[in-house]
Image (cartoon, helix red, strand yellow):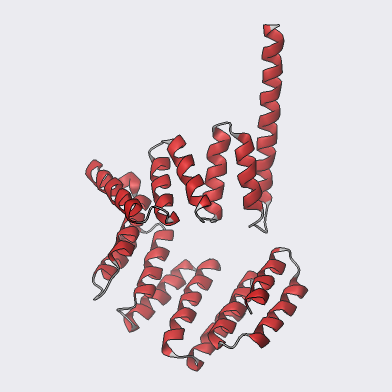
Amino acid sequence: PRFWKALIFAYLHLNQTDAAERALAHFDTLENSLAERVLVKSRYLAAEKKYDEAEALLRSSLAKLALDQRDLIQLQRIQLLTGAGHSERALALAEQLVKESPQNEKLLQAGFRLALQMGDDATSQLWETRLSKLDQIDQFNFDYLHAQRLLASYDTLGSMERRNLSRLIDTLRTQRPNWYPAVTLAARQADLVGDVKQAVAGYQTAIELGNSRSAILQRLVSLLYKMGRYNEAQNYLERLQSTQSDTTQIDTYSMAITLAVQRDRKSTRLNSSHTD
């Protein structure tokens, strides 16, 4: 099943919808787990922008699944609404689900991350407070989420809060030095304070450790371009291109890099001729 699952989304990336449908049919006959079949098909439908069909599929499956499997479906519903541009509805759904399961850490984290993504610091703090009141909580994960929120509101932090954030990120990195989310936090902090060299090194390390988020790759390309490190920028652009179906922005970056290289070469030739 894993092979056919990967093939579904590989074909979709190549805009080969018919082949993706055939791969989905093969996957459906081989996968024993109803929850997994529903999750994969809903992702397929969402990728095809068939959000209403995906939502209907997810909702209709809930009554057929065991309690522990329903969480996966509910989390997918939140992600689906977010991907469809309905963040407010997604947050309302998270609120509803947490009222039903107030000790569900995964749902609480989903609500927290969604509020953070929406740029709503007050709501993020509310979800963070809820997380802090869990009967059992992974302290490392909570510290990471707390650092994420502080970093998202960095411009509003006082000097003491910024120092505390730095110490918290250092602690996270010390505890898990090769965990790319913490490495990414450190890179983002360096970026925010204007330490471009440190930010670039951090983003590069995070990517090598497994962070393949397009936003991180795009930011790294942008910084490398500004630093005049065009070959490196182009290499990361090619990585980014392999993960994107819409390459309009990538093509714009690539053209800018090409023009910058041509401009630099022309400038170098002119300087050489003046020297001669």
**Which corner quadrant of the image does residue 252 belong to?**
top right
Up-down relation of residue 134 to residue 194 (above or below) = below
The percent coordinates of residue 178 (x first, y second) are 42, 54
Looking at the image, the residue that sits furthest to the bottom is 64
The part of the image, by quadrant, that contains residue 125 is: bottom left
Asked whether the viewer can see residue 56, the reply is no
Asked whether the viewer can see residue 117, the reply is yes
- Identify which residue is drawn at 67% across, 59% down: 245
x 42%, y 89%: residue? 67
**Near-viewer residue (198 or 177):** 177
How many marks do you count on the picture? 0
Vertical relation: 227 (above or below) 69 = above
* Quadrant placement of the N terminus: bottom right
The C terminus lies in quadrant: top right
Residue sitting at x 33%, y 54%: 172
Q: Nearer the viewer, residue 249 or 3?
A: 3
Kindly identify the residue that appears in the image at 69 percent across and 67 percent down: 10
Q: Position of residue 188 (x, y in %)?
A: 42, 46
Q: Position of residue 97 (x, y in %)?
A: 38, 80
Seen in the image, is 233 located left or right of residue 118?
right
Q: Nearer the viewer, residue 173 or 78?
A: 173
Above or below residue 193? Residue 37 is below
In this view, 185 is above or below 266: below
Q: Position of residue 163 (x, y in %)?
A: 26, 44
- Residue 130, by quadrant, is bottom left
Q: Residue furthest top?
A: 276
* For residue 242, side relative to residue 160 (left or right): right
